[in-house]
Amino acid sequence: MSMAEYKGKVKNIQDTPFGYTMSIIGGKWKMVIIYLLAENESIRFNELKRQIGAITYRTLSAQLKELETDGLVHREEFPQIPPKVVYSLTPKAKSLLPVLESLCEWGVENQ
């Protein structure tokens, strides 16, 4: 169903597929995190933090937890000392990559 078909049928944009999608990838950091995970296959928390740069540890942790809850990020913990945790994209997140690539192409064309 297109956005036009939803017009007048819902009272809240969050109730539409567009609203759902934006709730999953919206915000300042989620698309950046998804992009870096796509580039790196799997990555440790501190390396992800280094690659992003301007994000706080608390914010990165919260964003990763939200992405994990939404089924876009897989967190794998290895039982060793010191503990090792790596993050990667789920198949659900990988299905979103063409959409993100299209957004990037639009940015290149219109910047």
Image (cartoon, grey):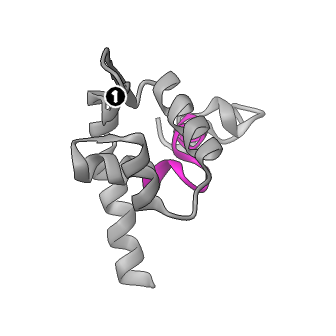
Q: Nearer the viewer, residue 84 or 8?
A: 84
Q: Residue at x 64, y 42 (%)?
A: 58
Q: Residue reaching furthest right?
A: 11
Q: Which quarter of the figure has residue 6?
A: top right
Q: Residue at x 43, y 58 (%)?
A: 50
- Residue 55 screen position, x and y as percent: 58, 57
Where does label 1 land, which residue? 84
Q: Is residue 38 above or below residue 5?
A: below
Quadrant of the drawing holding the C terminus: bottom left
The residue carrying pointer 1 sits among few (fewer than 14), some (14 to 19) or many (20 or more) residues within 10 Å by Cα, namely few
Q: Which quarter of the figure has residue 89?
A: top left
- Residue 52 screen position, x and y as percent: 46, 60
- Whether residue 4 sits left or right of residue 88 in the image: it is right
Q: Is residue 26 magenta?
A: yes
Q: Is residue 104 above or below residue 96?
A: below
Q: Secondary structure at mark 1?
A: strand
- Magenta residues span 18-32
Q: Nearer the viewer, residue 72 or 41?
A: 41
Q: Residue reaching furthest top?
A: 79
Q: Nearer the viewer, residue 87 or 108?
A: 87
- Whether residue 3 sits left or right of residue 41 in the image: it is right
Q: Residue reaching furthest bottom?
A: 111
Magenta segment main secondary structure: helix
- Residue 28 screen position, x and y as percent: 60, 56
Q: Residue at x 66, y 29 (%)?
A: 15
Q: Residue at x 33, y 22 (%)?
A: 76
Q: Amino acid at mark 1?
A: Lys
Q: Residue reaching furthest front?
A: 81
Q: Is residue 82 magenta?
A: no
- Whether residue 86 sits left or right of residue 62 in the image: it is left
- Residue 44 screen position, x and y as percent: 34, 40
